[in-house]
Image (cartoon, coloured by chain):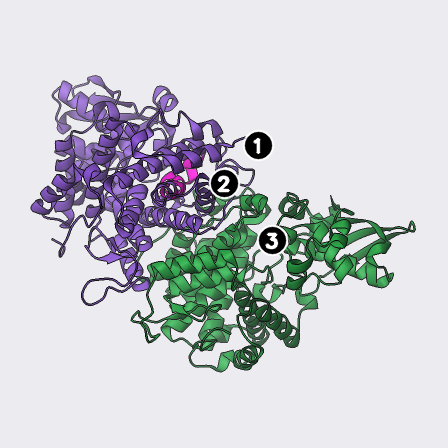
Chain colours: A purple, B green
């Protein structure tokens, strides 16, 4: 029997151990974990996230009056510091992780790994008493699988489907499967059960609806479900990814099975993952950095600028195109004009700037000076590279080109641990989910994650 | 603003009342409910169903030692007579409903409504203290919506996707949304959250994997989740069905939006739903009935037959084609040769016959005499009509044609209440989930369902 790409990938995910992973990849995984906690905390108080938490708390285990649980193993809801079962904790933390649009992204697969992988592995590691090394190993398995599934599904998939929801379900299954010590055969079944649950459509963007929170919530929880079922003997399709009636057959026109097994064990896709620096849709970041660059180089103020042409890839036009005048903060994050307006007027497009100033008159005026055009070079190199290009027309008649080859937060331009702490602390303060001292204690613990024999609660006591 | 098909359909589902529904449709809904309970009981003891129940019981509310619950409202797990939250009860009963392949089907949409609609509405009706009329009204809303969504998604969808999983998620949302008294606007959001979770791929058939149980489980539970979230203000895409990045855009090539609103309120698609008479994949039924007809007409025994040509539609070849020699009972139900073999040798292709005789030497020998060919007339009229045609070559050289225009269990050839009771009782006895006296008490209660002010437990006490 020949080995299929699904088998090879499942076997890799099942058998990956801490010792297999190079030290710099482990360190980067710790960075991504800390960065994720900031995003998960940032969802506190968001209406859509709170609705998902309310549903889960109504449908799940009831904490006893003492705060202890009768369920086997309890998992932490980061934003509220309550506990529930791993399935429902993964759903809630998954919902909160992507709300503020600051979680990490893998450029080549246009996939947000942290928002679906960490909610699942943290919940299961806590509930089953596993170590920090186990958590990190499982997370790496999830990143490596999810990124390759996203690359495999390709650009045609991403035009309609939210890859973080679809590939994310398989990623969460791979991560939890590694943690549950599935055999390669069981992992293949977990992939089958995950892939047949994979879902998430972009249609919600048109209405600024809440579906993105549902996509990450369900990817984390459904992937966890798939792995638990596989551990209990439940079987799934053996070629859910590349089979004739599998994910690619149903949801892609340009799937490439070779991507599924690309340099497994030597290429660490996790280390290619970018931190998000601006609080907006990733598709706006290259142009935002290019605009910052040209404004700094030529010492321009926003009032000096008559027009900005953002030169982008087709995916940016597809995802961002529907929004013109944003009606909500969330739509503002998908409005290229608003993002460039905040950069030009405020110098920063952070969480607080979006909340306070996405309709600021100067920002709105700048927004109307921005247009997007398809750029042949940017489009050709995307999604492997996210080149940023803008052309700025000044009021005094100059035409200035700005360009960045690698946006801030990308692997070649990554964040330091200090910058990661600053970002996470800003997010925690924004939502009020954790105090500065809570966060300081968390960092001290998290930077030694690989040394902890048990992953316990990250935050104890009542919410800040 | 123009009204979209999604809006029209959502408004219908939200505002449908008991008084709107003709008496014969209510009676048929009761028949379908009783038929469904038989199927839900029949899943007891099945490995895949038990795995899903174990997962839900580990992740959900824990019954107190007294058997009462601290959660708001408890819903019944029919096969085990335990209770849990509505979300998890819908998941478990959804898993068990489709296991034995005896639940109802709507021919035109190739959709199994009962397996996804009744688990969701029973759970919510029990947990929230609603009446029998409320349950029936909600079920009708679910059938009418799910069938139209299945018809809308079309045959190209069904080639890759398990429509019962995909359209079923929207059906469950419509049903629960009606029960939760969502406004039309909230119902539209429930559709959005349901459609963006819709999933289910046929790839598992190749491996006889357990995914079908997962598809019905998740459709029922995910649809319920969508409706509860909508009641709590969570928003979804307003055109998840027909929008440019919606379900049809991603998962169909021949979607027809006019199907979504076809004669709402005058055409009752629920009454077009067929009861399954044979315990096999529905695609085998027309040929099975045609073979029975020709064998009776010409007084043939299986030993008289040299060859059978089953004349079928393309969908039958797509779904059944992969299996030749079945390795499991489940595969046997998807093997045209095995089904016709049981019909020819045993005269019946029921649950017990599959369990005991799917590899019986005479059945296997007959199986190898069967071939399927595409029939132009059958294919052209499918899925509106499921014509059965076989050509039988006898050992003494005769060539005999068998034909049925409407298989047993279809609306024009439907089951009586006595036949429905007999079928449900056989299923309950097969799994051991309910005794004959349990079932007799249930029938007496169920045939007066519309009179009951509260839907309580269907079966009390310990499992039979």
Q: Which residues are magenta?
A: A157-173
Mark 1, other Cα within 10 Å: few <14 / some 14–19 / many ≥20: few
- Residue B172 is situated, as x and y percent measured from the top left of the image, at 45, 60
Q: Quadrant of residue A413?
A: top left
Question: In the image, is A146 to the left or to the right of A25?
Answer: right
Considering every residue shown, the one lying at the far right of the view is B396
- Residue B143 is situated, as x and y percent measured from the top left of the image, at 52, 63
The tag on residue A425 is none
Write down the chain letter for disc 3. B
Against B82, is A31 above or below? above
Q: How many marks?
A: 3
Marks 1/2 in contact by CB < 8 Å: the verdict is no
Query: Which of the pair A325/A104 is nearer the observer?
Result: A104
- Residues beneath discs 1 and 3 located on the same chain: no
SS at mark 1 in the image: loop
The residue at which mark 2 appears reads as A240
Question: In the image, is B393 to the left or to the right of A328?
Answer: right
Q: Earlier in the sequence, mark 1 or mark 2?
A: 1
- Residue A333 is situated, as x and y percent measured from the top left of the image, at 25, 39
The residue at which mark 3 appears reads as B330
The residue at which mark 1 appears reads as A1
Is residue B298 something that shows in the picture?
Answer: yes
């Amino acid at each position: 029997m020949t080995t299929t790409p699904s088998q090879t990938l499942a076997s890799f995910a099942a058998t990956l151990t801490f010792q297999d992973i190079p030290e710099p990849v482990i360190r980067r995984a710790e960075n991504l974990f800390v960065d994720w906690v900031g995003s998960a905390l940032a969802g506190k108080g968001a209406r859509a996230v709170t609705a998902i938490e309310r549903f889960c708390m109504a449908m799940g285990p009831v904490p006893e009056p003492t705060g202890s649980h009768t369920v086997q193993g309890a998992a932490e809801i980061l934003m509220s510091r309550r506990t529930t079962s791993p399935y429902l904790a993964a759903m809630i933390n998954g919902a909160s992780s992507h709300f503020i649009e600051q979680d990490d992204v893998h450029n080549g697969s246009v996939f947000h790994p942290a928002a679906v992988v960490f909610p699942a592995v943290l919940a299961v590691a806590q509930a089953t008493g596993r170590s920090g090394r186990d958590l990190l190993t499982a997370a790496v398995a999830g990143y490596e699988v999810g990124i390759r599934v996203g690359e495999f599904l390709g650009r045609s998939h991403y035009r309609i489907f939210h890859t973080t929801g679809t590939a994310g379900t398989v990623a969460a299954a791979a991560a939890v499967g590694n943690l549950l010590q599935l055999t390669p055969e069981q992992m293949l079944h977990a992939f089958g059960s995950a892939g047949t649950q994979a879902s998430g459509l972009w249609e919600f963007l048109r209405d600024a609806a809440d579906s993105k929170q549902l996509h990450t919530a369900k990817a984390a929880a459904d992937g966890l479900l798939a792995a638990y079922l596989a551990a209990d003997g439940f079987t799934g399709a053996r070629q859910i990814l590349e089979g004739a009636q599998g994910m690619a057959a149903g949801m892609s026109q340009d799937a490439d099975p070779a991507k599924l097994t690309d340099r497994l064990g030597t290429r660490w896709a996790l280390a290619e993952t970018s931190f998000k620096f601006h609080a907006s849709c990733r598709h706006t970041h290259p142009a935002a950095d290019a605009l910052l660059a040209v404004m700094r180089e030529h010492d321009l103020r926003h009032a000096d600028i008559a027009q900005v042409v953002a030169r982008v890839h087709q995916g940016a036009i597809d995802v961002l195109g529907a929004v013109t005048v944003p009606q909500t903060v969330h739509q503002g994050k998908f409005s290229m004009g608003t993002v460039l307006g905040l950069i030009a007027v405020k110098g920063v497009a952070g969480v607080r700037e979006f909340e306070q100033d996405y309709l600021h008159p100067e920002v709105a005026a700048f927004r109307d000076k921005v247009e997007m055009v398809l750029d042949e070079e940017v489009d050709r190199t995307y999604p492997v590279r996210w080149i940023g290009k803008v052309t700025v027309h000044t009021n005094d008649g100059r035409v200035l080109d700005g360009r960045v080859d690698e946006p801030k937060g990308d692997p070649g331009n990554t964040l330091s641990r200090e910058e990661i702490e600053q970002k996470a602390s800003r997010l925690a303060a924004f939502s009020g989910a954790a105090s500065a001292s809570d966060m300081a204690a968390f960092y001290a613990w998290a930077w030694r994650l690989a040394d902890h024999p048990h992953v316990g609660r990250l935050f104890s006591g009542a919410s800040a």
